[in-house]
Image (spheres, rainbow, N blue to C red):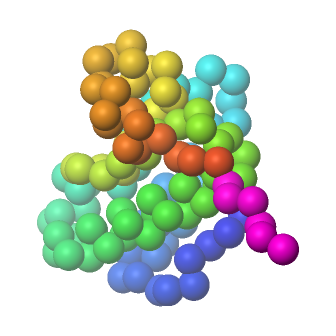
Amino acid sequence: MKKNDTPVVMQAEVEENYQYFLEAVEHEGYLFGAYLNEDEYEYEYCHRDIEEAQGVLKQMITDYLVEHHPGKFLIFIDWCVHVMSVEYARKHHETERTIRYCTVPQAKAEED
């Protein structure tokens, strides 16, 4: 598991949501997840802290998906960190542009 080395105000919440993601994504048929919903935290933290935590969580999840499920999931942030399968995105009418832009790519080959 690759973790972000930069501490954030909401580190415990980031770790907790990352664990929820890990538990969910490895179940057969995982299609969609919403993590670090700003509505759950906006009375305890400022929006800057929430956005920072969402960015850290997004990077942690992206790193995981690149390694374990490249090209199979989209990830993006608005009111939470959304993770969804490409099939789910198409079925729920995400635009092809969004799918192309947000799909987690395959890891780049290391150059010699």
Name the dominant secondary structure of the magenta segment: loop
Residue furthest out toward the front: 112
Image point (44%, 69%), residue name:
56
* Magenta-drawn stretch contains 111: yes
Q: Residue 10 location in percent, x, y? A: 38, 75
Residue in the foreground of this view, choosing between 100 and 15 = 100
Looking at the image, residue 18 lies above or below residue 91: below
**Furthest residue toward right:** 112
Q: Is residue 14 something that shows in the picture?
A: yes
> From the viewer's perspective, is residue 59 above or below residue 11?
above
What percent of the width, then of the height, locates residue 90? 39, 18
Q: Where is 35 relative to 59, above or below?
A: above
Is 80 within the magenta? no
Instruction: Report whether 104 appears left or right of 68.
Output: left
Q: Which residues are magenta?
A: 107-112
Q: Which residue corresponds to the image point at 45% horizontal and 21% vertical from the top-left?
A: 88
Towards the viewer: 46 or 109: 109
Q: Quadrant of the N terminus?
A: bottom right
27 left or right, relative to 61: right
Tell me if residue 23 can be seen.
Answer: no
